[in-house]
Structure formats: structure tokens, C-alpha cells
Amino acid sequence: MYKYLFKTRLLVKQFYNRNDGAHKLDHADQVYGNMQKLIILDNVEIDPKLVILSAYFHDIKVYKSRKYHEILAADFMKKNRYLFDVSDSDFQLVVTSILEHRSRVENRTSMLSHLLSSGDSLPISNINNIITRMYNYQKTYMGDNDIDKIIKNIYRHLMDKFSSNGYKKYDSLMRKYFDHDIHRLQKICDNITDQEIKTIILNK
Ligand SMILES: [Fe+2]
Ligand SMILES: [Fe+2]
């Protein structure tokens, strides 16, 4: 399977290179590693090829449109079906998992979808990592100059997405094993201040 992983990484690298600082190839690597951990944790039986394809193709189109990147990735895969040496039903599973990976999705239709969404959300135990990733994203578009504006954007994003009232819907697999971490993160975000965000960014 290492060969398949190597081949897939090579194929998607050109896309991730064009993405913002929070969605480079190391993000796909991390999601893949998280999915593997979840497979062990939940005793899942699944074709490792599908896990590789799902993890490595899920964010290939972030550089084109953050808002619609899952749809663009699915379209790319369908247009380039010949690249994927899997059965039609497995191909459909992978494409659907990518379409269902976003935070706002309420119900996911397969174990592969649960694995991708949960793997994409981890780790959540460390607020510093989450803020550093947001900073890398902001930096791509705003440079390093307007640090106060970056902090404001990060603060707003933490409130909108990760606080107790945030829009982020955690996948059921994620809630099964990381419920404690989810609540802890929500509480931290409810109470975080601009100054704390600044300290984390400056000490990263
Ligand atoms: Fe994504
Ligand atoms: Fe992602």
C-alpha cells in the first residue's frame, strides 16, 4: 500500500502546493494519519486504497474556491475517472465522502465519510495548533503586516465555528471518541481573548 500512497501523494501535490498555508500537503498527510488512528480505535474494516484517495483528494481544490472546494474536487474526480483504479461503487463512496466532509453537513452516509470528516477535524485537544493553522491561512492572504486584523479574524472564526454556539457539527464518530475534547475546546473558545490569541501566535 505504500506504493499506492506514494503515487497518490505525487498526483495531488501540484494542487496542494497552490492552496493556502493551512491546506498544504501536510494537511492531507495529517488527515490520512488521523483516519488510520480512527480505523484502529473503532475497529473498522475498510479498503486502505479508499482511505488514501479520500484523504488526499478531499482538499485539492481549496485554492480555487474555499466555499465550494468539495464540489470542485468531486467534479475533478468524475472528469478524471480513469485516474482511479477502483470499482464504480468504491469510486462513488470516495466522491461522496469528499462531498460530505464539510463542517456544516449534518448526516454522513458511509463509514468512509465519518472517517474523513473526523480525521479532518482532529486534533482538537490543542488550541495552539488550531490557532496556528488559522494564522497560516490568514497569512497567505494578508501577509504578516496587519497582525491586529489577523487576530480579529481568528477571534471571529473561533467564535463562529468552534464556540458552544458555533456552526461546526462534529461527526458522530468524532463525538463517540472525542466528546470530552470537543466540549473542552468549545469552553476555551467561549472565553478566549484577543490577547491570548496574540500570545499564541507570537510564541508559535
Ligand atoms: Fe475541506
Ligand atoms: Fe481538510
Image: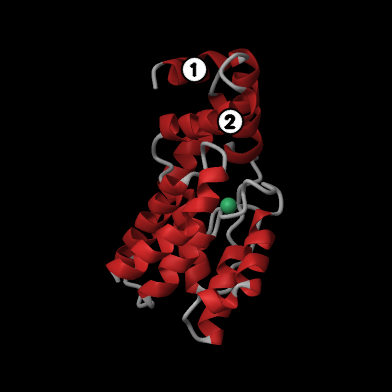
Q: In the drawing, what numbered circle is on residue 137?
A: none
Ligand 2 within 8 Å, label 1 CB: no
Q: Residue at x 56, y 34 (%)?
A: 137
For the C terminus, the image quarter is top left
Q: Amino acid at mark 2?
A: Thr
For the N terminus, the image quarter is bottom left
Q: In the drawing, what numbered circle is on residue 140?
A: 2
- 2 vs 1, front mark: 2
Ranked by sequence position, the earlier of labels 2 and 1 is 2
Q: Residue at x 38, y 77 (%)?
A: 46
Q: Is residue 120 shown left or right of residue 143?
A: left
Between marks 2 and 1, how big is the CA–CA gap? Answer: 22 Å
Q: In the drawing, what numbered circle is on residue 196?
A: 1
Q: Residue at x 35, y 70 (%)?
A: 4
Query: From this viewpoint, is residue 175 visible?
Result: no
The percent coordinates of residue 64 (x first, y second) are: 68, 49
Q: Quadrant of residue 155?
A: top right
Q: Amino acid at mark 1?
A: Glu
The percent coordinates of residue 119 (x first, y second) are: 44, 56
Tell me: residue 86, above or below residue 109: below
Q: Quadrant of residue 6?
A: bottom left
